[in-house]
Amino acid sequence: MKKFIKNIVVIFLILIIIYGLFFANIWLKGNFHTITQNQAYRSRQLDKKLLAFYITKYNIKSIINLRGKEKGVKWYDDELKVCSIYNIVHYDLDLAIDRKPRNEDIQYLLKIFKTTPRPVLIHCLGGADRTGLVATLWKLCIDKEDKKSALNQMSFFYGHMPFGKATILDRWLLDNISSDNVLKIENMIVKK
């Protein structure tokens, strides 16, 4: 029995180490991933150097910041400076991790999707939950992917955990994607 418990503990510790290394690697690279090649990318909040690197490497033309305007805060001011240097169009949208997105925010986001210069970089603090939600919307509304494929943007691979505060975003998505894979709010925009 002691050997069994010891083996379980060792396996558990190995899994924790693998999990930790996986997320450390994601964090060091900025949790940067392709949503749609040459069209849309996703990341965590990047520092000036990493942001400039990805802007140059992927020819980023616009940024959608999901953390809202925070003038006078270092990360925000740095991001605006980098955008100014590289002539990047910058959008701010205040999406919260612990509340449902407001219809007007989703409508604004869909308008940005259709009009912004591409490629676009979408980010929040960690690049997992809010960014996952918006990347899923991109896959549904721009790439016209099916629900199952689009929802892969809300996965463990990007750091999203389907429990805790972030579950409200998962539930909102499931409640707002119709059976024919159309975002219900997108229909509301067309009707107005």
Image (spheres, helix red, strand yellow):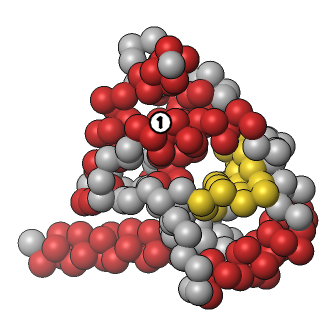
Residue at 56% x, 28% y: name it. 140
Amino acid on which the number 1 mark rests in the picture = Leu
Find numbered disc 1 in the image and state the secondary structure of the residue it sits on.
helix
Occupied quadrant, residue 81: bottom right
Residue 57 rendering spot, x and y as whole percentages: 89, 62
Residue at 51% x, 65% y: name it. 67
- Quadrant where the image shows the N terminus: bottom left
Could one spot residue 151 in this view of the protein?
yes
Q: Which residue is the extreme one toward the front?
A: 192
Occupied quadrant, residue 54: bottom right
Q: Is residue 125 left or right of residue 96?
A: right
Residue at 44% x, 27% y: name it. 185
Q: Is residue 57 above or below residue 172?
A: below
The residue that disc 1 covers is 151
Residue 115 rendering spot, x and y as whole percentages: 75, 37
Q: Is residue 143 above or below residue 121?
A: above
Relative depth, front residue between 159 and 62: 62
Q: Residues within 10 Å of mark 1 (few under 14, many from 20)?
A: many
Figure label count: 1
Residue 85 rendering spot, x and y as whole percentages: 89, 74
Residue 174 rendering spot, x and y as whole percentages: 34, 31
Q: Is residue 49 left or right of residue 122?
A: right
Relative depth, front residue between 12 and 83: 83
Relative depth, front residue between 69 and 25: 69
Q: Which residue is the extreme one toward the left?
A: 1
Could one spot residue 50 in this view of the protein?
no
